[in-house]
Image (cartoon, rainbow, N blue to C red):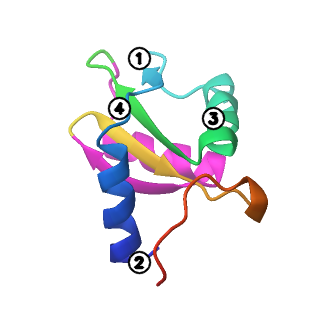
Amino acid sequence: MTSKQRAYLKSISSTYESIFQIGKESITPELCEAIRQALEARELIKISVLKNCADDPKDVSQLIAERTGSEVVHVIGRKIVLYRQNPKKEDRKIELPVK
Protein backbone atom coordinates (compact mmCIF):
# COMPACT_ATOMS: atom_id res chain seq x y z
CA MET A 1 0.00 0.00 0.00
CA THR A 2 1.37 3.39 -0.96
CA SER A 3 1.41 6.42 1.33
CA LYS A 4 -1.18 8.08 -0.91
CA GLN A 5 -3.55 5.11 -0.53
CA ARG A 6 -2.93 4.97 3.22
CA ALA A 7 -3.73 8.70 3.54
CA TYR A 8 -6.92 8.19 1.56
CA LEU A 9 -8.03 5.34 3.85
CA LYS A 10 -7.17 7.39 6.95
CA SER A 11 -9.38 10.22 5.73
CA ILE A 12 -12.30 7.86 5.10
CA SER A 13 -11.90 6.10 8.45
CA SER A 14 -12.05 9.35 10.42
CA THR A 15 -15.85 9.30 10.11
CA TYR A 16 -16.17 5.61 11.04
CA GLU A 17 -17.25 4.32 14.43
CA SER A 18 -15.50 1.36 16.06
CA ILE A 19 -17.36 -1.86 15.36
CA PHE A 20 -15.25 -4.07 17.65
CA GLN A 21 -13.81 -3.65 21.14
CA ILE A 22 -10.89 -5.64 22.44
CA GLY A 23 -10.89 -6.08 26.21
CA LYS A 24 -9.12 -8.13 28.85
CA GLU A 25 -9.39 -11.40 26.89
CA SER A 26 -7.43 -9.72 24.08
CA ILE A 27 -7.56 -11.60 20.75
CA THR A 28 -9.62 -14.77 20.52
CA PRO A 29 -10.22 -17.00 17.48
CA GLU A 30 -13.88 -15.94 17.52
CA LEU A 31 -12.91 -12.27 17.43
CA CYS A 32 -10.56 -12.86 14.49
CA GLU A 33 -13.31 -14.67 12.58
CA ALA A 34 -15.78 -11.84 13.25
CA ILE A 35 -13.20 -9.28 12.08
CA ARG A 36 -12.52 -11.36 8.96
CA GLN A 37 -16.24 -11.37 8.13
CA ALA A 38 -16.54 -7.62 8.77
CA LEU A 39 -13.59 -6.94 6.47
CA GLU A 40 -15.22 -9.03 3.76
CA ALA A 41 -18.40 -7.00 4.05
CA ARG A 42 -16.92 -3.52 4.59
CA GLU A 43 -13.23 -3.60 3.58
CA LEU A 44 -12.32 -0.86 6.09
CA ILE A 45 -13.04 -1.17 9.82
CA LYS A 46 -12.13 0.55 13.06
CA ILE A 47 -11.45 -1.30 16.31
CA SER A 48 -11.13 0.05 19.86
CA VAL A 49 -8.67 -1.43 22.33
CA LEU A 50 -10.10 -0.95 25.80
CA LYS A 51 -7.97 0.15 28.76
CA ASN A 52 -8.43 -3.22 30.47
CA CYS A 53 -6.57 -4.93 27.60
CA ALA A 54 -3.02 -5.55 28.81
CA ASP A 55 -1.57 -5.74 25.27
CA ASP A 56 -0.14 -2.81 23.33
CA PRO A 57 -2.53 -1.62 20.56
CA LYS A 58 0.26 -1.72 17.95
CA ASP A 59 1.06 -5.34 18.81
CA VAL A 60 -2.65 -6.19 18.74
CA SER A 61 -3.06 -4.55 15.33
CA GLN A 62 -0.17 -6.52 13.82
CA LEU A 63 -1.46 -9.82 15.22
CA ILE A 64 -5.01 -9.21 13.95
CA ALA A 65 -3.68 -8.16 10.52
CA GLU A 66 -1.67 -11.39 10.27
CA ARG A 67 -4.61 -13.56 11.32
CA THR A 68 -7.15 -11.87 9.03
CA GLY A 69 -4.99 -11.18 5.99
CA SER A 70 -5.56 -7.45 6.28
CA GLU A 71 -3.33 -4.38 6.41
CA VAL A 72 -2.97 -1.95 9.29
CA VAL A 73 -3.86 1.50 7.98
CA HIS A 74 -2.93 3.19 11.24
CA VAL A 75 -3.06 3.01 15.01
CA ILE A 76 -3.86 6.18 16.92
CA GLY A 77 -3.99 5.84 20.68
CA ARG A 78 -6.26 2.88 21.27
CA LYS A 79 -7.96 2.92 17.85
CA ILE A 80 -6.94 0.53 15.09
CA VAL A 81 -7.95 0.87 11.44
CA LEU A 82 -7.68 -2.21 9.21
CA TYR A 83 -8.18 -2.61 5.46
CA ARG A 84 -8.56 -5.64 3.24
CA GLN A 85 -9.58 -5.24 -0.38
CA ASN A 86 -12.39 -7.48 -1.55
CA PRO A 87 -10.97 -9.96 -4.09
CA LYS A 88 -14.16 -9.71 -6.18
CA LYS A 89 -13.84 -6.51 -8.17
CA GLU A 90 -17.63 -6.07 -8.51
CA ASP A 91 -18.08 -6.26 -4.70
CA ARG A 92 -15.50 -3.62 -3.80
CA LYS A 93 -16.79 -0.78 -1.65
CA ILE A 94 -13.65 1.37 -1.74
CA GLU A 95 -11.65 2.34 -4.80
CA LEU A 96 -8.10 3.19 -3.86
CA PRO A 97 -6.23 5.96 -5.68
CA VAL A 98 -3.89 4.73 -8.39
CA LYS A 99 -0.40 3.97 -7.12
- Front-most of residues 94 and 23: 94
Identify residue type, mark 4.
Asp
Please tell me the numbered disc located at residue 38: 3
Between discs 4 and 2, the one toward the N terminus:
2
Question: For numbered disc 4, what is the local secondary structure?
Answer: loop
Question: For numbered disc 1, what is the local secondary structure?
Answer: loop
Please identify the quarter of the rendering in which residue 69 is found. bottom right
Between discs 3 and 1, the one toward the N terminus:
1
Query: Circle 4 sits on which residue?
Result: 55
Q: CA distance from mark 4 to mark 2?
A: 28 Å
Residue depth check, mark 2 versus mark 1: number of the one nearer the observer? 2
Q: CA distance from mark 2 to mark 1?
A: 31 Å
Q: CA distance from mark 1 to mark 4?
A: 9 Å
Please identify the quarter of the rendering in which residue 33 is found. top right
Mark 1, other Cα within 10 Å: few <14 / some 14–19 / many ≥20: some
Residue 65 drawn in magenta: yes
Magenta region, residue range: 53-76
Instruction: Reply above or below: 79 against 65.
Output: above
Between discs 2 and 1, the one toward the N terminus:
2
Mark 3, other Cα within 10 Å: few <14 / some 14–19 / many ≥20: some
| Total marks in image | 4
Query: Circle 1 sits on which residue?
Result: 23
Q: CA distance from mark 3 to mark 2?
A: 23 Å
Give me the residue at 32% from left, 54% from top. 10
Query: Circle 2 sits on which residue?
Result: 2
